[in-house]
Image: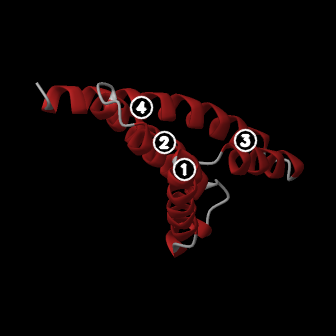
Amino acid sequence: MIILSVAIGGAIGSLLRYYLSTLNFLSNSVFPVSTFLVNVIGSFAIGILFFLLKDTNNDYLKSFLMIGVLGGFTTFSAFTIDVLDLFQNDQYLISVIYICGSVIVSLLAVYLGFWITKIINL
C-alpha cells in the first residue's frame, strides 16, 4: 500500500510540476525560473509537512505527501540539466547564481515552512 501511496502522490506532484513549467511568464527567462520556484516551493512545503507529520505514525500519509507528491513535484534532475545547459551556453555567472540561489533559498524555505508551522501550532 505504501508503494501505491507513493505512486499516486508522485503522479500528482509530477502533474503540478509540469503545469508550473508551462506558465508563460516563467518560460521567457534565461534563468530557469520554473525549476527554481518548484524546488523552493517544495522545500517550503516539506518544512510544513515535516512539522505537521512529525508525531504521526501514518506512514501512508507521509509517503504519499513527502515522498510521492513532493518527490514528484521537485526535481533535482531538472536542476542539474538546467545547470549543464547554462554552462554549455557560456552562462557561467547565471549558473553559479542559480546553484547558490537554489541551495540557499531552498534551505531557507524549508526552515521557514517548519518555523511558521511551529509558530501557528503553538
Label 2: element kind = helix
| Vertical comparison of 81 with 99: above or below | below
Q: Is any part of residue 39 visible from this angle?
A: yes
Quick one: label 4 or label 2, which is nearer the N terminus? 2
Which residue, as the protein is rendered here, is positioned at the far left? 122
Q: Position of residue 1 (x, y in %)?
A: 52, 49
Under mark 4, the amino acid is: Val
Label 3: element kind = helix
Quick one: label 1 or label 3, which is nearer the N terminus? 1
Q: Residue 105: which disc?
A: none
Query: What is the C-alpha distance between the residues marked 2 and 3?
Result: 32 Å
Q: Residue 6: which disc?
A: 1
Query: What is the C-alpha distance between the residues marked 2 and 1?
Result: 6 Å
Badge 4 is on which residue?
110
Check whether the beta carbons of the residues at disc 1 and disc 3 lie within 8 A of each other: no
Q: Residue 63: which disc?
A: 2
Please indicate whether residue 47 sits to the left or right of residue 63 in the image.
left
Q: Position of residue 18 (x, y in %)?
A: 58, 67
Q: Residue at x 82, y 52 (%)?
A: 85
Under mark 2, the amino acid is: Ser
Q: Residue at x 72, y 41 (%)?
A: 95
Please indicate whether residue 5 sits to the left or right of residue 57 in the image.
right
Badge 3 is on which residue?
95
Quick one: label 4 or label 1, which is nearer the N terminus? 1
Under mark 1, the amino acid is: Val
